[in-house]
Image (cartoon, rainbow, N blue to C red):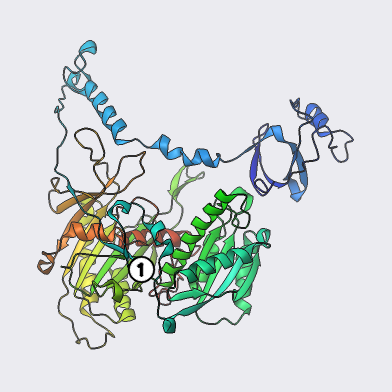
Amino acid sequence: KRRWNNEVVIATYDKRCYSIMDIPFDQSPSSLPVQGLGISHAQYFAQKKKITLKYPNAKPMIQVQGRNDQPIYLPAEVVCANELDPQIRAKLPLVASYTPRIRHEAIEEMRRYLLPGAQKSQGGGLLPALGIGLLDERVVVNVTKLPLPVIVAAGGRIPEGQGGNWAPLTAKANYNANPNKVVQMNVVVVYHKSIKSSYQSVYKRVADMIRHHNATYQFGSKPFGVVEAGDMNQHWGAIERYFGGTKLPDNVFVLDLARPPRGQSNDPAYGAVKCFLAKGGFLSQFVNFQTHDHGRSRDARDEKKSTTILSGVARQILSKCGVRVWWVTIPKEVPLPAVFVGIDVFHAPRKFDPKEGKRKAGKESIAAIIVQILRSHNPAENSLVEIYCETESRAAGKEMELGPAMNRAVSNALKAFKVAPSSCYIFRDGVGDNSIEQVSQQEIPAVRQALSNPGQVVGAKTKAANVPLSYIVCQKRIATKFLTLQGDAIPCGGLITDIQGPQYKTFYINGTSPPFSTPKPVRFVMAHNDPPLYGVSPSKLSWALCHDYPNWAGPIKLPAPVQMAHKLAELAGEMGDCGDTINHKKFAGKIHFL
């Protein structure tokens, strides 16, 4: 009953969707009368719907929400769920992906139809018949395995064999924060009314996990405030009323224990709540009780799953507050302090317009700019992150002309952290080969101008010397894939430099992938690189930064600054105002968008 309440089901006889209100296990179609008609539900379906039930005595009945919110009852045999079983959903990537071996064999099979004489029994082949020849070989390249960068979590180094999944190893990390510098967060717990009986125990578990890490930021034994919420407007409305009528201290953190309505996997109020809190500069973290009910563990397996999820939540909360949950060593040749800039643009999915009869952009595009600062190669001197971010809404589909926005973001970051950089690396996503020259000519001068003006940096000269800069385009939507000569996957961190573009120096890095698919590389295009940075390996730096994202669950293949820009742009795209009211200055030093 708990599993199906609030879920959406489909009536198989008319394909209508209904929300489940209750499941009376003591009634069957034969025993439950239809109010006002004097007949049972089994008779009603036989007479009115012309449907003879196969199991008229089967219990339970399904109470759903009908017109004007009135309850109606449906026999269990005439309804079905509107989503795939979770176990089946988990296996969908197995259907949509191909292992390297399967891909290799498919290529060999297709070659039989394309090579002259390869298909003896059925003519000379398709392309030869059209006068087109195909070389009987694949492009062979050399691959260099980039080692896993040194990853340190609370003093412990991550072993080489854990390079694809080292987050669980940080569950017991002790950051040994100075007790005199510990910051107590004032936590406001927002909980869905359906979990009223368990929100306190869940909060206590999360707070204990955070305290166990002994980091700079801590949760108290009890929350500062509690807000009971419902669905949709009862969710964001309850939060707005609380924040509008309560005098709040500094260091507020909102922990939202949400349960999406009607069986939806994600809470539809998420964007509205995030938008409201981001406007005020309040950090927040959602915990989805639809994914797992942390208040009710049926067995040890359930309890273990809950602990794993909440442990990840605790680490993510620390990351949002500004704790560097692990440290990644970058090449020593990088001049410090260094500024890493990541840029990505989110485009809303196109929607079908019935009036015009074609698909149109749903809303504005959002550009996100991440500015990350690194001052030292020593992990002990980098316990907190220095990250500044900004977003900008723009016309749908507009990818270029980001120079002014990048200038503003970099200038504000240097002022916020009072740093005079010695080098700058820009990682740009979303740029095709034909646009690289145009985009780099727009954006490089804008960033140079910001770097040359130290602003409020203490001890800096009125005008700083030219800061050496590198501009790297990251292209992830490419069709290129690399296999060994035997048809197997090349190793994670495989570096390929044998394939070069016509104008710019290019290299590929093969990232991680699930075991049931073929790794997809990212093409890195060196659009610009100043001479003082010639001694820095761009491939080693890019590969190291790929491991610096605090909680990325997907394939490791993009440097953290541009991956974080992607995440921020996507979050802003879910907000009603496209992120225009995010209090970026208050979020300086916080990775609020994780």
The residue lying at 35 percent from left, 72 percent from top is: 385
Quadrant in which residue 194 is drawn: bottom right
Q: Which SS class for mark 1?
A: loop
Quadrant in which residue 245 is drawn: bottom right
Question: In screen coordinates, is 286 left or right of 151?
Answer: right
Residue occupying the far bottom of the picture: 459
Residue for badge 1:
154
**Count of number-bearing discs:** 1
- Which image quarter is the C terminus in? bottom left
Given residues 314 and 448, the one toward you in this image is: 314
Q: Where does the image place residue 61, in percent across and percent down from the top left? A: 76, 39
Whether residue 321 is visible, yes or no, is: yes
Q: What crowding class fits label 1: few (fewer than 14 Cα within 10 Å), some (14-19), or many (20 or more)?
A: many
Figure check: 14 above or below 309: above
- The amino acid marked with disc number 1 is Ala
Figure check: 67 above or below 568: above
Q: Where does the image place residue 589, in percent across and percent down from the top left? A: 38, 74
Q: Where does the image place residue 121, in percent across and percent down from the top left? A: 23, 11
Quadrant in which residue 97 is drawn: top left
Question: In screen coordinates, is 403 left or right of 281?
Answer: left
Question: In screen coordinates, is 480 left or right of 317?
Answer: left
Q: Where does the image place residue 240, in percent across and percent down from the top left? A: 60, 71
Given residues 233 and 196, the one toward you in this image is: 196
Whether residue 437 is visible, yes or no, is: no
